[in-house]
């Protein structure tokens, strides 16, 4: 990933306030509460709000991101909540996760650069055990029209970084679909996710 991408996230996460708040994403929270406790991996976890929530449920939590500033905030949040998380810094292929290591993989607004996003999905799939679950929420390709009306709702401006139902099916073909839909929702997550937007939600169980 290029330096401009890294600098963008370090700048966003380097501020005192938490960019997306400290409360977990609602969809993630709803789905995790249905699942037994087990090891979970959070992709592009930023400042740690979702990872800390999962750890508070007694789960063994791993997370990764490219931003050192995000990691600092995540560790600070974990300490404030008296939990620990295994937070690794860098690009996915270099982080030493193992095949079938996790019961759950969470991708919550994990908008990777377009040229690597499918590759990352396929790599993450290898780290999930059979019968493990993926929980995914991110902006859809139709979100650009919402962003044009309200920049506070956030999300990438590059349509290639956004998602479609067809892309999710192609990236995760070996899953029983529990839920897969495009949905209009209202977000209230910190300073950068505020307002109505269009998202893809996916929960699937690995065959």
Image (cartoon, helix red, strand yellow):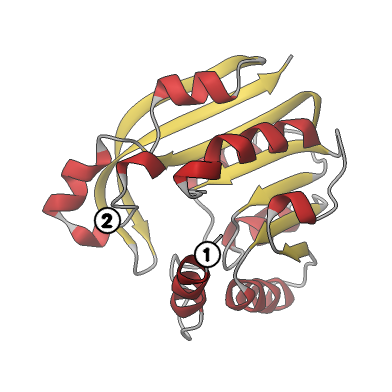
- In the image, 127 versus 150, the foreground residue is 127
Pointer 1: residues within 10 angstroms few (<14), some, or many (20+)? few
Q: Percent x, y for residue 84?
A: 80, 67
The reply, left or right, for residue 42 in relation to residue 15 is right
For the C terminus, the quadrant is top right
**Quadrant of the rendered structure where residue 131 is?**
top right
The tally of labels here is 2
Task: Pick out the residue farthest to the bottom.
Answer: 16
The reply, left or right, for residue 135 in relation to residue 61 is left
Q: Percent x, y for residue 181?
A: 40, 23
Residue at image point 25% right, 35% down: 142
SS for tag 2?
helix
Q: Percent x, y for residue 69?
A: 59, 78
Q: Percent x, y for residue 51?
A: 66, 57
For the N terminus, the quadrant is bottom right
> Along the polypeptide, which appears first: circle 2 or circle 1?
1
The reply, left or right, for residue 9 in relation to residue 34 is left
Q: Which residue is mark 1?
A: 2
Residue at image point 20% right, 60% down: 151
Q: Is residue 190 above or below residue 166?
A: below
SS for tag 1?
loop
Q: Which residue is mark 2?
A: 153
């Amino acid at each position: 990933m290029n330096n401009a991408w890294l600098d963008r996230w370090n700048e966003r996460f380097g501020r005192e306030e938490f960019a997306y708040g400290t409360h977990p994403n609602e969809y993630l929270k709803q789905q995790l509460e249905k699942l037994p406790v087990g090891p979970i991996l959070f992709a592009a976890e930023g400042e740690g709000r979702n990872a800390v929530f999962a750890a508070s449920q007694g789960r063994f939590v791993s997370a990764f991101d490219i931003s050192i500033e995000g990691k600092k905030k995540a560790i600070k949040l974990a300490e404030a909540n008296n939990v620990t998380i295994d937070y690794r810094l860098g690009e996915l292929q270099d982080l030493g996760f193992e095949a079938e290591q996790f019961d759950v993989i969470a991708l919550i607004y994990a908008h990777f650069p377009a040229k690597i996003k499918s590759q990352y999905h396929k790599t993450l799939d290898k780290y999930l055990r059979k019968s493990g679950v993926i929980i995914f929420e991110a902006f859809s390709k139709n979100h650009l029209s919402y962003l044009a009306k309200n920049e506070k709702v956030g999300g990438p401006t590059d349509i290639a970084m956004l998602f479609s139902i067809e892309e999710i099916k192609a990236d995760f073909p070996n899953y029983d679909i529990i839920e897969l839909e495009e949905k209009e929702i209202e977000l209230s997550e910190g300073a950068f996710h505020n307002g109505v937007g269009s998202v893809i939600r996916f929960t699937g169980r690995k065959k």
